[in-house]
Image (spheres, helix red, strand yellow):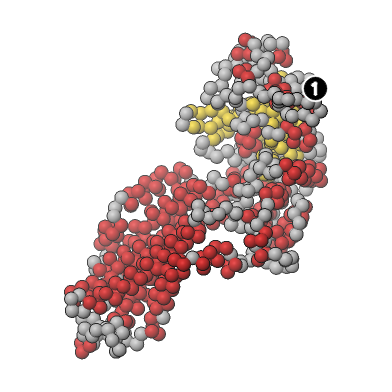
């Protein structure tokens, strides 16, 4: 594991990433101007509703956006100093699975039904590393054991339908880790699992992260998951990053009204509440974005000034940023939208 | 989860055993097929005809081409099981050797079909930019009635069994390609394909390892029907004199030659006709059975 920068070095640097999708109704930006900095060994949570651009961000980093209809139209992605947007297709295949791995939401459908679990792990190992079939098999058993699958040698010969959901997600994690990636993108890894299994999988991910000094991006819509397992949080809304902060700062004092609304809608065990507060309204359609701030129609703090330009991400305290006009005392700071 | 359904892999596996093990007889698909009455009936029909074709040398004594004027128009009986034709040739020999050629031609068509149909279907389904052009070419082929197009192609290439195979393969390939394309379109959107891409797999690996193996079920079913259709179409071509040329026996040209004597010597046309009907029935039952068992829509989700 040489060349694996020290803890604290910047591993991933994303600047102005914009990914557009062409549809029959027109072209829209699924994510717009996303900046992301990830230090080695850090666990970043990306939070947002469905359609906020969390998954598109992760897929864009791996250049896995299906084209057509999608395309990365602007921005830069630097992974360990290497520009991923200009890397060759061949180099990208080496990076995928070798240096950056991804695990997906649906463990039920993320494994190929016609091959055994072992085949699929061994395939990935041997694709990235020159290794004999025997050695790869030993490695696969070791990995399955490591991700907490009992009787790994036996499970190796089983087909995905013979495993439970939790076991499949563990097998997926084993595949993702098979080549010691430096960065793991976990796209809602626990959403499809029941709650007890969720906790186990997240615990496993944290253990592995610490043990292998991995950097993890955990995409989720569950703020409870965020609170327990990540160091830093990025909140996305309608394709833009609207707040970014350390996890404690974020929970203590959210600076964006959307984050505030999200936090208020979590049931709390400490205080008795009859009704949870919901954020009123719905996420705007990408074709009918409001002028100015995208959250304005749903925002309790909105004023007339909010219509003047989409607010940029501004420093909102030590190592945190938010995109809200209130930070500047309702002075429109963002350049007006075209 | 489904632990009781998998007795085959229970018990600790010694670490030095090979990873891949096929307990085919215990596989649920094979067991369901063995219990499927239509499939088994079809299998018996097809197996009988195939065995007769394979062992035609051992099962017959008379040369299918040998003329014997003395024995013309012998009805089926003790000496000649299926009787003789207008040249005194043994019908038994001719029908069995005819079965050999008919099945070989059918097999050849199926093989070419499987190769080119899969290739074209996979390319069209996976590389969307090729889809339009490939499928429009396929549409052009499919716009003609099967037999008419096959006649046209054999007429252009010249009669003969090899050319009949080529013509029939060309006629049926677009149909197979469409079916493969449809499955590829579904499977390429599956999450495990995305996962394989995220693991660094390239196009070729994704197609070969992840997409095509999951498209096999409808293709296999389609190919059994293609097998039946191509045997029938080959008979039609031979009947019209465009397939294998006399005196080589195929079911089509035996029927064609016998049709002048259909009133006096019905057996000459009836027996190859029955053999053809039995084979087609068997293959169709086989295909139906496979479809019932392999079709995911009829299968209970595990």
Residue B6: x %, y % from top left: 65, 62
> Among all residues in the image, which is located at the extreme front?
A274
Residue at 27 percent of width and 69 percent of height? B238
Closer to us: A15 or B208? B208
Residue at 67 percent of width and 24 percent of height? A278
- Residue located beneath label 1 in the image: A318
Q: Mark 1 lies on which chain?
A: A
Work out whether residue B115 can be spotted.
Answer: no
Q: In this view, does A332 lie above or below A197?
A: above
**How many numbered markers are drawn?**
1
Q: In this view, does B138 lie to the left or right of A13?
A: left
Q: In which quarter of the image is residue B62?
A: bottom left
Residue B213: x %, y % from top left: 54, 56
Q: Is residue A244 above or below residue B249?
A: above
Work out whether residue B234 can be spotted.
Answer: yes
Q: In this view, does B134 lie above or below B228?
A: above
Neighbour class for label 1 at 10 Å: few (<14), some, many (≥20)? few
Q: In this view, does B231 lie to the left or right of A324?
A: left
Q: In this view, does A325 lie above or below A124?
A: above
- Where, quadrant-wise, is the C terminus of chain A in this rendering? top right
Residue A256: x %, y % from top left: 71, 21
Residue at 61 percent of width and 57 percent of height? A115
Q: Quadrant of residue B90?
A: bottom left
Closer to us: A186 or B75? B75
Residue B246: x %, y % from top left: 26, 75
Q: In which quarter of the image is residue B83?
A: bottom left
Q: What element carries label 1?
A: loop
């Amino acid at each position: 594991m040489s060349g694996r920068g020290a803890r604290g070095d910047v591993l991933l640097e994303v600047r102005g990433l914009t990914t557009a999708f062409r549809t029959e109704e027109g072209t829209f930006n699924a994510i717009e101007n996303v900046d992301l900095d990830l230090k080695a060994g850090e666990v970043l949570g990306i939070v947002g509703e469905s359609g906020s651009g969390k998954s598109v961000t992760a897929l864009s980093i791996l250049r896995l956006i299906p084209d057509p209809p999608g395309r990365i139209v602007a921005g830069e992605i630097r992974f360990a100093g290497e520009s991923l947007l200009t890397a060759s297709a061949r180099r990208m295949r080496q990076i995928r699975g070798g240096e950056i791995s991804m695990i997906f939401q649906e463990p039920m459908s993320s494994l190929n039904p016609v091959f055994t679990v072992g085949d699929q792990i061994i395939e990935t190992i041997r694709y990235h590393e020159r290794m004999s079939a025997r050695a790869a098999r030993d490695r696969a058993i070791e990995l399955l054991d490591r991700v907490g699958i009992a009787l790994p040698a036996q499970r190796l010969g089983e087909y995905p339908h013979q495993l439970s959901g939790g076991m499949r997600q563990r097998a997926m994690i084993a595949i993702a880790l098979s080549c010691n990636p430096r960065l793991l993108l976990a796209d809602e890894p626990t959403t499809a699992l029941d709650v007890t299994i969720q906790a186990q999988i997240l615990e496993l991910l944290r253990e592995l992260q610490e043990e292998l000094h991995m950097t993890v991006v955990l995409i989720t819509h569950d703020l409870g998951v965020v609170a327990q397992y990540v160091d830093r949080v990025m909140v996305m809304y309608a394709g833009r990053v609207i707040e970014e902060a350390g996890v404690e700062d974020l929970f203590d004092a959210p600076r964006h009204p959307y984050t505030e609304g999200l936090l208020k809608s979590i049931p709390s065990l400490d205080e008795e509440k009859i009704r949870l507060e919901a954020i009123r309204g719905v996420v705007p359609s990408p074709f009918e974005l409001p002028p100015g701030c995208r959250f304005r129609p749903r925002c309790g703090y909105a004023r007339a000034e909010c219509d003047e330009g989409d607010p940029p991400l501004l420093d909102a305290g030590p190592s945190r940023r938010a995109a809200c006009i209130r930070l500047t005392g309702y002075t429109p700071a963002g350049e007006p939208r075209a | 989860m489904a632990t009781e359904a998998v007795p085959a892999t229970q018990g600790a596996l010694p670490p030095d055993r090979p990873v891949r093990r096929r307990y085919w007889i215990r596989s649920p698909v094979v067991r369901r097929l063995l219990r499927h009455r239509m499939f088994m009936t079809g299998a018996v029909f097809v197996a009988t005809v195939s065995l007769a074709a394979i062992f035609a040398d051992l099962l017959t004594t008379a040369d299918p081409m040998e003329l014997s004027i003395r024995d013309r128009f012998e009805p089926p009986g003790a000496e000649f099981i299926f009787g003789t034709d207008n040249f005194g040739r043994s019908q038994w020999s001719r029908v069995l050797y005819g079965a050999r050629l008919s099945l070989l031609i059918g097999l050849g068509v199926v093989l070419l079909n499987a190769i080119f149909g899969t290739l074209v279907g996979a390319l069209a389904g996976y590389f969307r930019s090729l889809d339009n052009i490939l499928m429009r070419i396929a549409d052009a082929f499919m716009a003609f009635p099967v037999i008419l197009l096959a006649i046209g192609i054999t007429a252009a290439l010249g009669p003969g069994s090899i050319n009949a195979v080529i013509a029939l393969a060309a006629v049926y390939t677009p149909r197979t390609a469409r079916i493969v394309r449809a499955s590829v379109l579904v499977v390429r959107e599956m999450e495990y394909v995305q996962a394989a891409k995220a693991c660094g797999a390239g196009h070729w690996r994704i197609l070969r390892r992840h997409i095509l193996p999951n498209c096999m079920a409808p293709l296999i079913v389609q190919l059994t029907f293609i097998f039946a259709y191509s045997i029938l179409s080959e008979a039609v071509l031979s009947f019209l004199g465009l397939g294998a040329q006399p005196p080589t026996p195929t079911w089509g040209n035996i029927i064609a030659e016998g049709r002048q004597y259909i009133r006096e010597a019905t057996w000459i046309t009836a027996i190859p006709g029955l053999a053809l009907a039995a084979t087609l029935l068997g293959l169709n039952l086989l295909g139906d059975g496979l479809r019932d068992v392999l079709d995911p829509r009829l299968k209970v989700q595990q």
